[in-house]
Image (cartoon, rainbow, N blue to C red):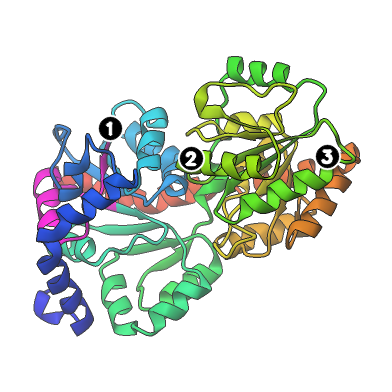
Amino acid sequence: MARDRLPFTLKLYRGSTRVASPFAGMLLKRRLRRDKEDPTRVTERRGIASEQRPHGPLVWVHGASVGEILSVMPLLDRIQAGGFSILLTSGTVTAAKLAQQRLPEGVLHQFAPLDSPAFVHRFFEYWRPGLALLAESELWPNMITEATRRGIPLVLINGRLSKRSFQRWKMFKKTAAALLSCIDLCLAQEIDDAKRLAQLGAARVFTTGNLKFDVPPPPADPMALSALKRATRNRAVILAASTHKGEEAAIIEAHRRLRRTVPNLLTVIAPRHPERGRTVAGEAEEAGLLAVLRSRARLPDSGTEIYVADTIGELGLFYRLAPIVFVGGSIVKHGGQNPIEPAKIGCAILHGPYVSNFAAIYAELNRTRGAATVTGVDSLTTSLELLLHDPNLVSQMAEAAHGTVQRLGGALDRTFAAIEPYLVQLRLSA
């Protein structure tokens, strides 16, 4: 895209981010203090590489955080099997740690540069990708316009655009159209996502389904799982997964009420941001409940009531430990977290009403009775009590949830088929 053809809003954004570049150090220092950056790799945020670029054609894949990184893992395997080198970038420390644990051997990971013209230019100068795959809704203006200027094909994979985001973008329709016109191909999760992207100006849009349905269930270390099962033998266990600030209080209060009829109850809370673990444990202690932190290498004992799973990459353990799971980000107005992982493992799922990030998935899980909606402490307590006293209902919900996500798979094959021509062209031009 020629710079003189950029709409005023993008010119303003580009100018503002250029002027702000000298102050990036202040921003990064503040983020470091809040544990939102890796101090050993912070230069990557300025576009300075910490890995050697491999020889030959390079495919660059970018996802914002943990959910996006997990969703593209099987696609990385397919691309790598074709002999291509892959660079994966992400924007959060949690996603980087997950990448270290689960990336296929040979796939490189870097933190994405801040969206400043200078940092983005430096990033592209060094890595020189031949194809860029952007996951879900990662539309950073400088990143996109610089890739377009260099003639790098851009493909949006697993694309989504919520109603709320769509309404915001409509207020800047020329800006959205300018950015989306740079995307060579948009592969949307759902028909509604595809319609919204097309209305905002995307030229080639296809619905391929949600890659998250084709991600294998999260792993669990057999020895760690065995130890947890021994520690919780003869106890009822429930899990609150990927919770956000404000939700733990509801879970803790529900536990307080439930222990009257389920005296051996253990509630596991896995906060979406593990660094909040000590805060969550503090809330439990204030409520008069004994809490233990997983990060301190402790197992729950007979006196533990709240077990805070404040570690990274271990949700697979707790989905296999707890047959009943509340999926967070849904009682507070966050938009809901991904329910596919617990459904694949076979858990009965509860969630709040605010699930716009995964609206179609939750609607289908609710329709098949693999999941149920709760609205607050009262309904959460009632639903948990019902399930804790009815193992048959738990089994029925778990089977329905598992069957639903199995039936909705296939996005991986469709996505790879759509990007394969770009891979062929990349090989021919190498």
In the rendered image, the vertical position of residue 301 relative to residue 421, given as above or below? above
**Tag shown at residue 280:** none
Query: x, y percentage for residue 224?
Result: 59, 18
| 341 in the magenta segment | no
Quadrant placement of the C terminus: top left
Cα distance between the residues tagged 2 and 3: 26 Å
Residue 259, image quadrant: top right
In the rendered image, the vertical position of residue 290 relative to residue 331, given as above or below? above
Q: Is mark 1 in CB contact (under 8 Å) with mark 3?
A: no
Question: What residue appears at the point 36 percent right and 50 percent down from the top-left corner?
Answer: 63
Q: Which residues are magenta?
A: 109-132
User: Which mark is nearer the camera, 2 or 3?
Assistant: 3
Q: Is residue 141 visible?
A: yes
From the image, tell me which residue sits under label 3: 259
Query: Which amino acid type is marked by label 3?
Result: Arg
Q: Is disc 1 placed on a helix, strand or loop?
A: loop
From the image, tell me which residue sits under label 2: 274
In the rendered image, the vertical position of residue 313 relative to residue 370, given as above or below? above
Q: Is residue 131 visible?
A: no
* Mark 2 or mark 3: whose residue is earlier in sequence: 3
